[in-house]
Image (cartoon, coloured by chain):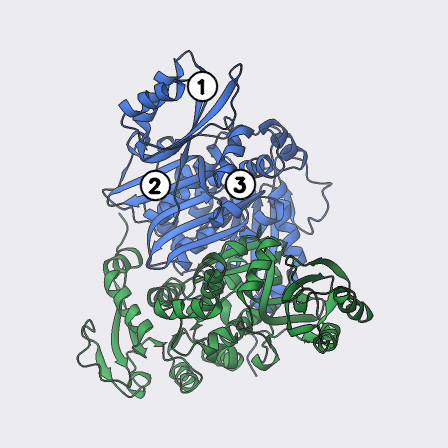
Chain colours: A green, B blue
Amino acid sequence: MQKTKSMSKINLGLVGYGTVGSGVAKFLSRRKSFFKNKFNTEFVIRTICDVRQLENVRGLGKARLTRKFHDILNDPKIDIVIELIGGLHPAKEIIMEALKQGKHVITANKAVIANSGKELFQLAKKQNRHLYFESSVGAGTPIIKMITEGLAGNKFKSIYGIINGTCNFILSEMTQNNFSFGQALAEAQRRGFAESNPTLDINGMDSVHKLAILAYLAFGKFIDVKDIYREGITHISHADIEHATSLGLTIKLLAITKKENDKIEVRVHPTLISQDHPLASIHSIYNAFYINTDPQGNVLLSGEGAGQMAAASGVISDLVNFVSRGDRATLPCNLYSEASGLKIRKIDQIKTKFYIRFMVTDKPGVLSVITGILGKHGIGINSVTQKAHNPTATVPVIMLTDFTSEKMLRLALNKIDKLPVVKSKPVAIRMEKLL
Amino acid sequence: MQKTKSMSKINLGLVGYGTVGSGVAKFLSRRKSFFKNKFNTEFVIRTICDVRQLENVRGLGKARLTRKFHDILNDPKIDIVIELIGGLHPAKEIIMEALKQGKHVITANKAVIANSGKELFQLAKKQNRHLYFESSVGAGTPIIKMITEGLAGNKFKSIYGIINGTCNFILSEMTQNNFSFGQALAEAQRRGFAESNPTLDINGMDSVHKLAILAYLAFGKFIDVKDIYREGITHISHADIEHATSLGLTIKLLAITKKENDKIEVRVHPTLISQDHPLASIHSIYNAFYINTDPQGNVLLSGEGAGQMAAASGVISDLVNFVSRGDRATLPCNLYSEASGLKIRKIDQIKTKFYIRFMVTDKPGVLSVITGILGKHGIGINSVTQKAHNPTATVPVIMLTDFTSEKMLRLALNKIDKLPVVKSKPVAIRMEKLL
């Protein structure tokens, strides 16, 4: 018979008791006996800090309540601080102070890792503590662990991510239910998949933060979020979705990072991909990560990337990671070793193929003028489609270009936009051929 | 400035130097400086054991060569034994002896974990050593780590896996390139994706071993591989693929395990799923795992599940896991705690919908006889399709049933098979509605 080791007790301090915080408490309470039986561990929420009155909140058990986070940071009995308030400040200061006080930290905060990860990982290393952040990208879909542990040793070549559930929901609804952008956004809000102010989701900023974290983990370079190219989904119309579908393509908001020699690309923009590709089947609020590594090849991971219990699941996996690893072990996602000499390739220098929709007056010669201007800018055309014909109305013309630089495309489109026969600003969407 | 810790040196003993073993050696040699810089660790292959002459093999470095595995097991300087010979014996004895000698073990051996995992995990626990087996399922696609660590704490409800690359390649070629089964198998062999004797792949046995491991990890119950229902892909014809496609469905060899209250299902068989589902987009030699957990929801993981460097990638991730975890930590995938009271639901008791193809003489009244027999067995019909009409020939009739038990279906099909108008054994393929 095995000797039974005595039960470990881990004291937690929760900073922030909103949606995710209460999800963590619920998860721990539901699975209490599982953690005892399997990991011989009892997780105790010792203190909860929130700026709101929590006295009447149910399900807090014996946790002490406070509005001052120093009550947690200064408590020597607390082993792990779980930071769930979001935003850069004071989250960063709370994490730093916790590490200095000798506590391990779990956070779900993408802004703080994207903006200050370098400093925080260095501090964690100095203090010999762990900083876990699984829920910061993809919530409970374990992408951080997959990149830093599951595929450890591989060379990363590219990551294509659908990393904003709100945008993916909107584009899916536009594609599958023929919704306009506005209808799809309203539906997302009605179902709780979009904030009442959805700006940071639909303008791509949320994806930018998450992409900064992925690029660091994959390539070992922290990238200033200001250096990440960003384009949201507000200019995508239902017409574009229909044209894309008829061409065997699907529009997704992709976060893309690639490395080639000493150059890396980091960009967030709507992207046309083949309907055959597994990423095209990722619908609704799901996130997905399509990663190319050497020698493992392509790996796809997908799951719900938001929501109370999904985010809680990521925090719980961090807790289990800590328990199974112990105090003094090395945490792979904290190993800070910046790749020297890596440079960011600016969006101007990146060549992709483009889908372009022109709204034009339907008369002879229009196509030849437009293709002429494109040709003068060195932009090859792979296909031209004009389905509707109506000499008295504006009709869409769809062109798919060959590889061209952003810069030349913008120059050409500016000229074309000024033609009297072109009736609204041309819409250009990048295409990616995923292997 | 940080203190630089002295470099760790980990001595490895490789048992088996075939495709995967030489892949591991290649991987370690290519990424030597990466492991030094990031993990402050040098992995040294101290001894290689193989039954073949290795003296003239290139790239072995300073490794000592032996044909006796005891030279590795008895060497006190070896920290980790990497077992890559496959098959149950003597792999099991080598792993047990290594653990008893105080060594950690990494194996890529599905047979030994599926058949003897329980005994091996108990021994590893007793010896306070680690037994890693990431490559045993999905090769370098990190499914073991995802189930045992990434989704730790979640309750597992079901796993649907495409876990045999050979079968997925064959079915993909039949679907995409209109190949017959025989042509697709020959193509798989030509491209090195199928063994010269492909029996264990195409009869589902390889998937059965891997499913036993997944079911244990998800539900905490070791299942005798003999208790896993198994049906291969040899009876799938190109006609079935075509009919499936026209119905918006795709045929995949799925390994399925589900838990409902105290009953679990474990079965491997060709399965019709909707073309919309992400698993339907998993083509060629790729593996995929579609996992439903509470509360994280559905998670999909996919990657190459076989091949020299993919399998080596899984072994390397085990090595990094060991390095980051340290000698005395707990390895979640070794935590042995068998769920008591769980019972296996026999295939007879499992209800699914079925696709059935009958080859019949095309004359009036045939459909009514067949549907009459199905009806008497309580089998409802959701749709009947007969596309071709030719009174002088045998034509296919496709029926999709409502939920029915395996047992009633077999009884009904046996009766129908005896009708003079039915010209060949009816083909029945289960359908699953994946959420």
Circle 1: residue type: Lys
Q: How many marks?
A: 3
Specify which label sits upstream in the sequence, 1 or 2: 2
Circle 2: residue type: Phe
Residue labelled with disc 1: B425
Mark 3 → mark 2, Cα distance in angstroms? 30 Å
Mark 2 belongs to which subunit?
Answer: B
User: Mark on residue A186?
Assistant: none
Residue drawn 18% across and 81% down?
Answer: A55
SS label for mark 1 = strand
Residue labelled with disc 3: B70
Mark 3 → mark 1, Cα distance in angstroms? 54 Å
Specify which label sits upstream in the sequence, 3 or 1: 3
Mark toward the viewer: 3 or 1: 1
The crowding category of the residue bearing disc 1, from other C-alpha atoms within 10 Å (few below 14, some 14 to 19, many at least 20), is: some
Question: Relative to A159, does residue A204 appear above or below in the rendering?
Answer: below
Residue labelled with disc 2: B222
Mark 1 → mark 2, Cα distance in angstroms? 36 Å
Residue drawn 63% across and 35% down?
Answer: B188
Question: Relative to A278, does residue A19 appear above or below in the rendering?
Answer: below
**Residue B38, position as x, y percentages in the image:** 58, 68
Q: Nearer the viewer, residue B73 or A179?
A: A179
Judged left or right of residue A322, residue B94 is: right
Within the image, what quadrant is residue A244 found in?
A: bottom right
Tag 3 and tag 1 share a subunit: yes
